[in-house]
Amino acid sequence: MYVSFNLSELPPDSSIEKAIMHIPVQKYSRKPQFFRVKADWNMQSLRHDPPHVSQMKNVINKSTLHAKKKYSVIHFECRRLAAKWAANQFMNHGIYVRHPYRGRKPSLYVTVKVPK
């Protein structure tokens, strides 16, 4: 599953203090894998030419797992990644999740500090 988050609406002089990505994953399946997407993509291009990705190795180590009835949700602390995305929207291509739970989409919760 490919997903990206639009951070362009954050105030330009704000700083990201906290960012938590909630990633639904299948229960009792293979260990999920996470990848940073390195190029532009859209739904049509995914069918013919998927973008290049690079594996995010420490997602599981920096996460907590919350079990639900039909699926689990990984809470991934990703402040540094979100700050990079906010600083350079042209490099914000999102993530690719292998073995996601298809019934729910990932979400990103961001806390920002806006100077007075």
Image: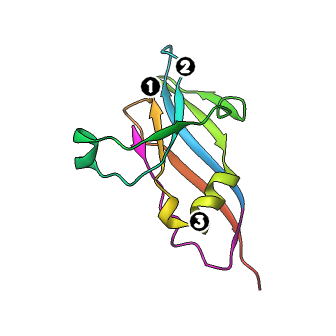
Question: Do callouts 2 and 1 mark residues in contact (Cβ within 8 Å)?
Answer: yes
The residue identified by callout 2 is: 31
Quarter that holds the N terminus? top left
Q: From the viewer's perspective, is 25 left or right of 58?
A: left
Mark 2 or 1, nearer chain start: 2
Mark 2 or 3, nearer chain start: 2
Find numbered disc 1 in the image and state the secondary structure of the residue it sits on: loop
Q: CA distance from mark 2 to mark 3?
A: 29 Å
Find numbered disc 2 in the image and state the secondary structure of the residue it sits on: loop
Quarter that holds the C terminus? bottom right
Secondary structure mostly seen in the magenta stretch: loop
Q: CA distance from mark 3 to mark 1?
A: 27 Å
Residue type at mark 2? Lys
Question: Do callouts 3 and 1 mark residues in contact (Cβ within 8 Å)?
Answer: no
Highlighted range, magenta: 1-16
Residue type at mark 1? His
Q: From the viewer's perspective, is 50 left or right of 5?
A: left
- Report whether residue 110 is seen: no
Q: CA distance from mark 2 to mark 1?
A: 7 Å
Between residues 84 and 21, which one lies in front from this camera angle?
A: 84
Image disc number at residue 115: none
Q: Residue at x 30, y 52 (%)?
A: 42
Residue 98 forms part of the magenta stretch = no
The residue identified by callout 3 is: 86
